[in-house]
Amino acid sequence: MPRLVAPLAITTVAITAAAAAASAAFLLWTVRRTRGHDASTAASEASLPAGTASARERSRRLQRFGNDLPEADVPSLPLIGHARALGEVHAIFARIGTAFNFSFFSIDVLAVAGHENLRRVFSNMESFNSAYPARWLELFGPSAVTFIEKEHRRIRNILNAGISKTSMLECYARIHELAKEQMDAIALAGRPKTDRNWLSWSECKETKGAQVIEYAHRFTFHVMSVFIAGADPSHEAQLATCRHDIETFAGAMADLVFPRFWPYTPFNKAMRARARVVKVVLGMVENRRARMEAGESFRDLLGNLMEYRRSDGDALADNEICDNVIVMLFAGYDTTSATLSTATYFLTHVLSPSERTNLQAEIDGLPLVGGLPSEDALQSLPLLDAFMKETLRIMPPGKFVFRKAAKDAEINGSPVRSGTVILAHLQTTMLDEMVFPHPDTFDLARFLPGGSALAAPSFAYVAFGGGPRLCLGMQLAKLKFKVFLFQMLRFHTVEAGTAPPVHESFPVQRALNSVYLTTRKV
């Protein structure tokens, strides 16, 4: 039997390669055919009487998409549909307006942007429900607060209690401690270990600086471990070991094409990682349950989930607890670490010298008590707050969110039928030049007193979403951002690394940036 392994492997590789070649040839043929079809269709419609072509097109859209809104002006290919539209959403909005239809692997989607459309979609949970790819539900768990409708408010309140203002104050010094650990690590990793005050040419070539995303990952994940299981230091440590497993989820979110049973796909890999995380969480739940029966209590997010009782007296099932712990771990670390990496890019490559000098002076001017600024003082720094908001406006970690019409509704003056999948585009909304003049320019002044952004209408700034499903970790995310930047700028000199920044846009948007840190004498 072992002799068959090599021939089977070779055969499998050959079949896969042949299938890939056939698929590529088919797609090339369909692209050429579609382009020819589009040209002939346009020519034939141009010869029709005025108004006939548009009437036919409107009728086709109503029949296919269930609304009279325009279709994406990119070719639609068999099987993959308007897949190209996902990479050009902002440009398509600029060309044809704030709502358009497109198809993606046989799923029809309505993309919307603009504060009026987002107000309608985000503020009305009865008309627009949460909607995400089925694989995401399987990955994070169908009971996670992100996906549920019936008990969304109650579960959200439980989770909010675990990351409340009181909880943040109790963990404030610990958050600074974790940030300082990563700053020290960045300072050591960014340069060669040498006692000389100069570097050789080969050392300069090899030294590109420390990639911020790696250290931001460690920081934000450990912070989430503190809030989720910090009432028991051993449980906090156990949860912190799950970081590499949770990191696989980002790749799995983008894996919407490969068959789920293929063993080495990102989705399959992440599902195996999920099983390991579930095992760790269930072990903590069983340990705590026995101790809670003996009268012990746990003041953290996991403890809140375990103590919750529904109106009929039933507790949350173990799978419901695991689903919500997993989604909080991922959402609380990945998006914030992406924003921190992006912020260092804007800090080292985009901020003007005067803006950076003013930001540095603001942070240096904070009075310290026991080596730390007060939480209120840190949160109220106007330049640091403006820097955070402008970073999130130009490059939010989540470019869009999904919703689904729960009943017939209306968008942009057109009826939208029940069941329509809606892609609400956050980034395009925050790049609206009617609300944010010169939207592509990084400008701290727009968020300072008297700035134009302060007069923006509701749902124009949607870095954290909006409505009843506003990001429940928003306040904690802001605190992590400000603590990380404070520890970086107050105690270190920051220089841009020589590694070129890299922009990643899906599933989490971020600028991968490298820096050098040199410890300052304060």
Image: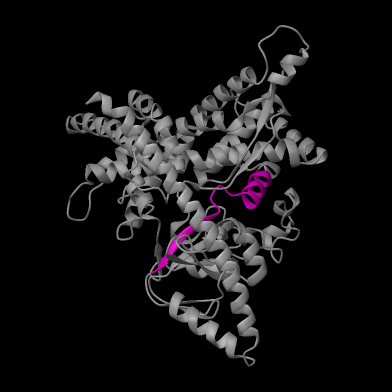
- The quadrant holding residue 161 is top left
Residue at x-position 27% and y-position 30%? 284
In the displayed structure, does residue 306 sit left or right of residue 87? left
Magenta part of the chain: 385-405
Farthest residue, direction top:
195
Residue at x-position 70% and y-position 52%? 447
| Residue 47 visible in this rendered orientation of the protein | yes
Residue at x-position 21% and y-position 26%? 1
**Residue 495: x, y in percent?**
73, 28
In the displayed structure, does residue 184 sit left or right of residue 170? right
**Residue 474: x, y in percent?**
51, 47
In the displayed structure, does residue 41 sit left or right of residue 346? left
> Considering only vertical position in the picture, is 350 above or below 517?
below
Q: Does the magenta portion include 81?
A: no
> Considering only vertical position in the picture, is 369 above or below 506?
above
Closer to us: 275 or 23? 23
| Residue 163 visible in this rendered orientation of the protein | no
**Residue 85: x, y in percent?**
57, 61
Farthest residue, direction right:
354
Q: Does the magenta portion include 390?
A: yes
- The quadrant holding residue 435 is bottom right
Q: Quadrant of the C terminus?
A: top right
Residue at x-position 67% and y-position 37%? 501
Q: Disc count in the image? A: 0
Is the image coloured rainbow, by chain, by secondary structure, or in one colour?
Answer: one colour
In the displayed structure, does residue 375 sit left or right of residue 63? right
Closer to us: 407 or 106? 106
- The quadrant holding residue 126 is bottom left
> Considering only vertical position in the picture, is 285 above or below 48?
above
Closer to us: 330 or 52? 52
> Considering only vertical position in the picture, is 418 above or below 347?
below
